[in-house]
């Protein structure tokens, strides 16, 4: 005896192939939701309303022993975030036969005319936003989201705003896909927040190209604490930058003054360098970065923020540091595994009574730095930073932690 799991779309029986329609016609038991069963209102089969899954499974098991033809009606592809996975857990595999329909996500990408073989599909139907948050923070280019009443398009829009991502996304809402009242729109987030959408919808988030220098509204930006989203960042690791909250603490610890020379070692995207350059236009900031991708981002961000006092240095520390002007302040945000050597060069070149600040994410690098500072007799203090940002979770709000960072502030005797 076989249990047939039949995928169906909003076009009902008309969307089934002839072979699958014949399977449904032979059914003596139809299992499905009110909507699915309504597509076969004149069918003579007994009906089991799909409600409590435990009860439904028990009813299907009872029918198996009678030799009846059981057809379970589900939406789209039963093995794509569908009932098929649960049926495989509860019933013998050899008794199940799957007949998939087009999935809503497949329809959504075809409607918006975007290839989807590399898309990330996430269901928040009865689930938390955790997987979606991770995908957005990683800058996944194409994200399709299966929603529910609590995790609606509006809730996803609120989540996007609260994350302050460096990536910009087009926001597509695809409603009633395959039905006569199908509607597919790309909307600004502000409009998504204000609208109510059909219960059957799929959200597609499509990452866009970074803003160009001319598109950034510099007049609207704060002088201190630039939003992470305003920086051009690594396309494959958009969250890889010194976060805004950490940057503001680093700037305070550096005890900056006008007209200084500052080294930013391991500058990454140049976020710290640019914050300094905007606050102190008479200072010179050397942004040292070993990767060509990082150097290109530093130069792009300099153009974006229209700063001219950041000198981008492509080279590996400590070797490249010998060529730089003597610094009044040094910030070390990355060491490439050469922390002891970098500290040695920085310690030798920093002016008397200069300030050295390190931001360290690992215990191993913290131990290395503390031992060097103790052995060389520097005065230092530690600041343990553990911060969380609020993020929207449906109609609620929770805190999402940033990676803990230890900031060391040392002063040369």
Image (cartoon, helix red, strand yellow):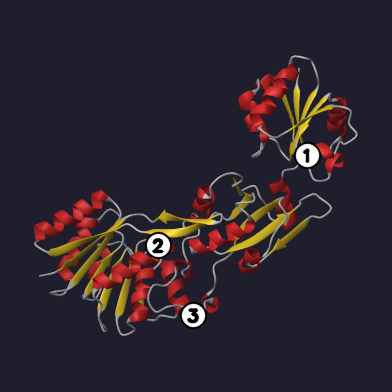
Q: CA distance from mark 2 to mark 3?
A: 21 Å
- State the residue position of label 2: 241
Q: Nearer the viewer, mark 2 or mark 1?
A: 1
The answer to whether residue 113 of the structure is visible from this angle is no
Which residue is at the front of the view, 85 or 281?
85
- State the residue position of label 3: 220
Q: Quadrant of the C terminus?
A: bottom left
The answer to whether residue 128 of the structure is visible from this angle is yes
Q: Is residue 12 left or right of residue 309?
A: right
- State the residue position of label 1: 34
Residue 287 sits above or below residue 21 on the image: below
Q: CA distance from mark 1 to mark 3?
A: 52 Å
For disc 2, the neighbor class at 10 Å (few under 14, some 14 to 19, many from 20) is many
Q: Quadrant of residue 21?
A: top right
Q: Is residue 110 left or right of residue 388?
A: right
Q: Secondary structure at mark 2?
A: loop
Where does the image place residue 186, in percent across and percent down from the top left?
A: 69, 63
Mark earlier in primary sequence (2, 1): 1
Mark earlier in primary sequence (1, 3): 1
For disc 3, the neighbor class at 10 Å (few under 14, some 14 to 19, many from 20) is few
Residue 233 sits above or below residue 198 on the image: below
């Amino acid at each position: 005896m076989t249990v047939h799991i039949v995928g169906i779309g909003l076009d009902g029986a008309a969307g089934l192939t002839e072979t699958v329609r014949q399977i449904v016609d032979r059914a003596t038991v139809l299992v499905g939701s009110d909507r699915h069963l309504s597509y076969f209102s004149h069918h003579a089969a007994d009906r089991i309303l799909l409600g409590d899954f435990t009860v439904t499974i028990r009813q299907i098991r009872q029918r198996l022993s009678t030799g009846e033809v059981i057809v379970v009606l589900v939406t789209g592809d039963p093995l794509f975030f569908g009932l098929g996975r649960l049926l495989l857990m509860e019933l013998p595999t050899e008794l199940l036969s799957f007949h998939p329909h087009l999935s809503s996500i497949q329809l959504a990408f075809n409607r918006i005319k975007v290839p989807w073989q590399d898309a990330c599909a996430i269901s928040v139907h009865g689930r938390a936003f955790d997987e979606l948050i991770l995908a957005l923070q990683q800058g996944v280019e194409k994200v399709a989201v299966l929603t529910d009443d609590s995790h609606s398009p509006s809730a996803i829009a609120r989540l996007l705003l609260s994350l302050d991502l460096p990536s910009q996304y087009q926001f597509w809402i695809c409603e009633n896909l395959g039905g006569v009242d199908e509607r597919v729109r790309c909307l600004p987030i502000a409009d998504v927040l204000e609208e109510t959408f059909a219960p059957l919808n799929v959200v597609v988030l499509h990452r866009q190209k970074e803003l160009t220098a001319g598109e950034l509204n510099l007049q609207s930006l704060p002088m201190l604490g630039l939003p992470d989203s305003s920086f051009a960042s690594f396309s494959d690791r958009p969250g890889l930058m010194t976060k805004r909250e950490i940057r503001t603490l680093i700037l305070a610890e550096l005890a900056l003054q006008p007209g200084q020379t500052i080294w930013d070692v391991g500058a990454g995207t140049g976020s710290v360098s640019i914050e300094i350059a905007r606050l102190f236009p008479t200072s010179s900031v050397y942004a040292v970065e070993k990767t060509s991708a990082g150097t290109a981002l530093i130069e792009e961000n300099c153009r974006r923020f229209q700063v001219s006092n950041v000198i981008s240095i492509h080279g590996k520390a400590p070797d490249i540091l010998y060529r730089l002007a003597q610094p009044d302040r040094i910030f070390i945000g990355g060491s490439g595994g050469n922390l002891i050597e970098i500290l040695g060069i920085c310690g030798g070149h920093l002016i008397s009574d200069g300030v050295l600040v390190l931001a360290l994410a690992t215990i191993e690098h913290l131990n290395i730095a503390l031992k060097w500072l103790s052995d060389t007799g520097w005065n230092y203090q530690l600041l343990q930073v553990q911060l969380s940002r609020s993020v929207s979770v449906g109609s609620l709000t929770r805190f999402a932690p940033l990676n803990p960072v230890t900031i060391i502030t040392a002063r040369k005797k």
